[in-house]
Amino acid sequence: MPNPILSNDEKQDRIARNWRLEDVDEVPFLIEIGSFHASTSEYHSDHAAELAWNLDFHREREGVYDYGMPNIKPNQGINIVAAAFGCECTVNDEADPWVKPLIRDDNVQDVHALQVPDPRTSPVFRRAWERVDYLQSHSALPLRLVNVPSPLVTASLIWEYTSFITATLLHPREVHVLMEKVTEATIAYLHEQLARIRSLHTMGHEMWHIPREVGVRVSDDTAAVMSPNLYREFGVRYNGMISRALGGIVVHSCGEVKNVVAPMMETEGLRGLDLTIPQADWESVRAAAAGRTALCLRHYHWDHGAGAQVDLAAYSQRLVDFFGRRGLFIQTSTAGAAEARALGERLHQVLVR
């Protein structure tokens, strides 16, 4: 028997109730297709190419049963706030633009001279608004937010990464100066794009529908290399400021988060954790968070390792069995459309109550 066709309204209702930790008949799940889409030289400055990629992506997903909805990602790279502070970025053919840091061990005091970029006049942000305007004028599809790095991620791009991590111990005063400026800039950047986007799909730059009342999703990958107390000081504190300004927060982090998942739960207004679960310690995540906040557990086909032969539906079932259904979201992917349609059928059988 074919899967039922869910309207966008039905999907949004179930997703919203799941964010609120209410009971739903099916664990919401997403199946993306293909490889990671970065802001490479092919797309970074070519609005038409970016739009075409998004439209092709959703055409390829037609017939896939899941909780995805057509939308457009106005991708500019996770380094956008760092670039607005003046970091030199090099567009390339492999990933988001590479970033040259402004602060290193030999010029720590320069953090005091950094100017917070104006979201309306910064050339970097203005290019993002040009992209938003182009996408809105050439498509009726709703938009995601332009990339949203956490303050920690942006700070670790402005300040050379290894030096930044050691500076949290050696130069905490200067790190706080930078974090305060970055957080101020990030909040202003978010408010500006929310004022400009007419039809918003999600409060984040990834595919999950996050209603505005949930708050904003930030990418906080630097968290994985921090101790619990350092993350409380430099992660929880500044994410909490963003949460207060935006009405809540969902924190994403790749990598092993067992040292910081308990402090993450202390973040003011936390509404969810978004984790790359094959790289995380399941026991620590369950102990700290399961049933207490929404859990978006990602396992793209490449997250299991190159050449890994993993039954993605069975793996998703294991996640439900281990973490429980309350507030659980499953996000996975396949290399092609045929596999995605087949996986959608299987996941519906596995995840429906």
Image (cartoon, rainbow, N blue to C red):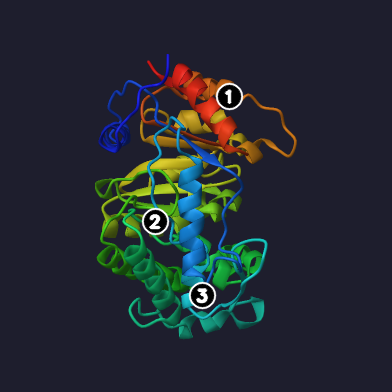
Q: Residue 168's spot in the image, x, y percent? A: 56, 64
Few, some or many C-alpha atoms within 10 Å of disc 1 (few <14, some 14-19, many ≥20)?
A: few
Query: Relative to 117, does residue 146 appear above or below in the rendering?
Result: above
Separation of disc 1 and disc 2 at Cα?
31 Å
Residue 86 visible within the image: yes
Between 165 and 143, the one lying in front of the other is 143
- The residue carrying mark 3 is 83
Q: Provide the secondary structure element on which disc 2 rests.
A: helix
- The residue carrying mark 1 is 315
Between 1 and 220, the one lying in front of the other is 1
Q: Is residue 274 left or right of residue 33?
A: left
Residue most extreme to the bottom: 113
Residue that appears at 38% across and 69% down: 134
Dot 3 amino acid type: Ala
Q: Residue 289's spot in the image, x, y percent? A: 42, 33
Residue 76 visible within the image: no
Separation of disc 1 and disc 3 at Cα?
38 Å
Q: Earlier in the sequence, mark 3 or mark 2?
A: 3
Dot 2 amino acid type: Asn
Q: Residue 278's spot in the image, x, y percent? A: 61, 35
Q: Choose top left, top right, bottom left or bottom right for residue 27.
A: top left
- The residue carrying mark 2 is 239
